[in-house]
Amino acid sequence: HISDPDLGTGYSISVKPEYSLSGKITLPTMYQGEYVVSIGNFGYVAENQTGGLTASHIFFKEDAQYKSIDKFAFRGSTVFTKDKQKLQGIYLPETVDYIGEGAFQYVESIKHLSVYAVPREGKDMKIGYMNDKIYFIGQNAFNPGPAGNAEWILYNLPTNLKSLGASAFFKAGNEVRFGTLPINLASIGTNALSFLPNIRIDSFGSAANAGAATPLKSIGPRAFMSSGDAI
């Protein structure tokens, strides 16, 4: 049970180390009369260990109130081979506003990620859209992403994003495309958007805010190293 100024009062859900979840899973909205607001350890494995999450898809109910994807929540293993990685799709509730450090690190099997709506199983789904409420994406959150997966396309960064951690999208894929960086973005970490060959950064904020001051205070070393030409 947790009580947090940002998350509110509720529960965090985790998977015990001795258990493994397989197939298509729909996570609960409530536990003991209170909302589940955070995803903790959901298959994390330490460096050089085998194991981890074997679910193929993770869904949420329409009334889900999850706010946070915690540190290393779905982190894979460096010793996984791609045929052993099972997670192909996760469709996070639009209430999520925080993605922690390494939340999806080494999950190279993923094809469909949405932090935008709450589709039910079988519903047709656009991929790679992020809820504009997200204000924090931690370091290594999607490092490395499914670089060899042609179905992985990420179109936008959240408009409310304030902090993009070091190596957050380092080598996250060939089809990462952000036309405009968020107007509220204050910091871009080291290597945060490096090795993204087709990335396109046209401006900060929307066209309506052209010429306006931005809160950007820091851009880390190599933040855009070896990324697209159109930056």
Image: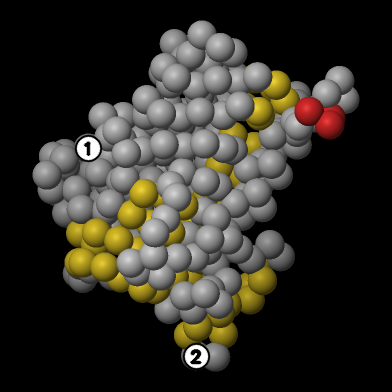
Residue corresponding to mark 2 = 32
Percent position of residue 127, x then y: 43, 47
Residue drawn 60% across the image and 20% down it? 201
Neighbour class for label 2 at 10 Å: few (<14), some, many (≥20)? Answer: few
Instruction: Give above or below for 206 relative to 45.
Output: above
Residue drawn 43% across the image and 78% down it? 28
Asked whether residue 125 appears in the rendered view, the answer is yes
Instruction: Give above or below for 55 relative to 154.
Output: below
Residue drawn 16% across the image and 40% down it? 82
* Left or right relative to 215: residue 175: left
Of residue 226 and residue 187, the one placed in the foreground of this image is 226
Residue corresponding to mark 1 = 78
Badge 2 marks a residue whose secondary structure is loop
Neighbour class for label 1 at 10 Å: few (<14), some, many (≥20)? Answer: some
Which residue type carries mark 1?
Thr
Instruction: Give above or below for 220 relative to 17.
Output: above
Asked whether the residues under the numbered discs 1 and 2 touch, taking CB atoms below 8 Å apart as contact, a structural biologist would say: no
Asked whether residue 36 appears in the rendered view, the answer is no
